[in-house]
Amino acid sequence: MKHARLKIIFSIFCLVLYFFNAGCGQQAGTSATTTTSSAGATTTTTFGLSQVNDFLYQLQNISLEAIGTTEYDLVVLDFSPGGSTDWSPSQITALKNSSGGKKLVYAYLDIGEAERYRYYWQAEWVVGNPDWIAAASPNYPDSYRVKFWDPGWQAIIFGSSDSYLDKIIAAGFDGVVLDVVDIYRLWEQGGGLTPVNSTASQDMISFVEAIADYARANSGNPDFGIIPNNAIGLSSSSAYVNTVSGILREELWYSDYLPRSADDRNYDIARLDIFKHAGKPVFDIEYVSGEAINDIYNLSQAQGYIPFATTVELDKLIINLGHAPD
């Protein structure tokens, strides 16, 4: 795989630089390198996923200035909130180096559904035209489930200056959170999508690997972050686990504001721990309030995960009492 070769080259490069006292960025989603000088001595510091112990996930009503005053280590934003406003490189750079401290900044990227309000949507598109638009989403009126393995759809996601990932890279994001990765299960199991695709899980693994390889080769950052949301069943693929930078799980402990069963939790934990044992951070996002907030923070942190409690709309800058970012 290209990514594996890049890591080997990068490691050799780091070793050479080390002997010349130049330093080298950490792996796993490096954000930036900051050089400071004091009394003739130069110190080089980096900030990467291995240093992240809290995160913010907000896709609507975003104020970069307000977020910048917080001490969150990782911030996940919609690159084009509402489909009309792209963040500029200067804005993303400012957020990375904001008054609240160094931040990694990731962009949300839906790879399993096409969204009518995105820049790429064309007025004449309907289900079946183009062929890769398979069905309207029953959950979101402006979203359409896609044949994610189709070259036409994948070309929208990455591969040219007008693709979504390329725009994210050009804006200077440190990585992406990939959403609707778990749509492969609907295709494989015949969940209302036809025809059944018996290789959908492997097709999704290949898609994520291609996204990762492309981003790391074209961003100038061989550790450009790739964090899938859910789809933890793909943990059975060691290649997939090695490719991604971490994993995000929604509603591990609570669903619809109620505790999940021990069996369901343990099933997920067994799969999430595969990522954890591979040295990949596990992020847990929960839609809870009240005392459940303390519960999910205690449970996740005891498991070695990184939790965040927020609103299901993901539309507020949340700092949970007693669990402020540091």
Image: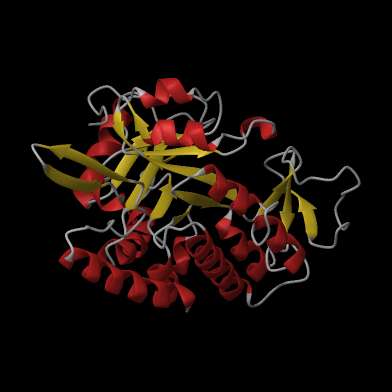
> On the picture, is 196 further left or further right than 239?
right
- Residue, x 28% and y 61% (percent of image)? 276
Which of the image's four quarters has the C terminus?
top left
Q: Is residue 259 visible?
A: no
In this view, which residue lies farthest toward the front? 40
Residue 242 drawn above or below residue 50: below
- Residue, x 34% and y 22% (percent of image)? 69
Residue 39 location (% of width, % of height):
8, 37
Residue 278 drawn above or below residue 304: below
- Residue, x 88% and y 42% (percent of image)? 123
Instruction: Say how the picture is coloured.
Output: secondary structure
> On the picture, is 38 further left or further right than 57?
left
Q: Can residue 28 be seen in this view?
A: yes
> On the picture, is 147 further left or further right than 297?
right
Q: Nearer the viewer, residue 167 or 260?
A: 167
- Numbered label tally: 0
Residue 231 location (% of width, % of height):
50, 60
Residue 259 location (% of width, % of height):
37, 40
Residue 30 location (% of width, % of height):
34, 52
- Residue, x 52% and y 38% (percent of image)? 89
In this view, which residue lies farthest toward the left? 39
**Residue 232, quarter of the rendered image:** bottom left
Q: Nearer the viewer, residue 120 or 303?
A: 120
**Residue 132, quarter of the rendered image:** bottom right
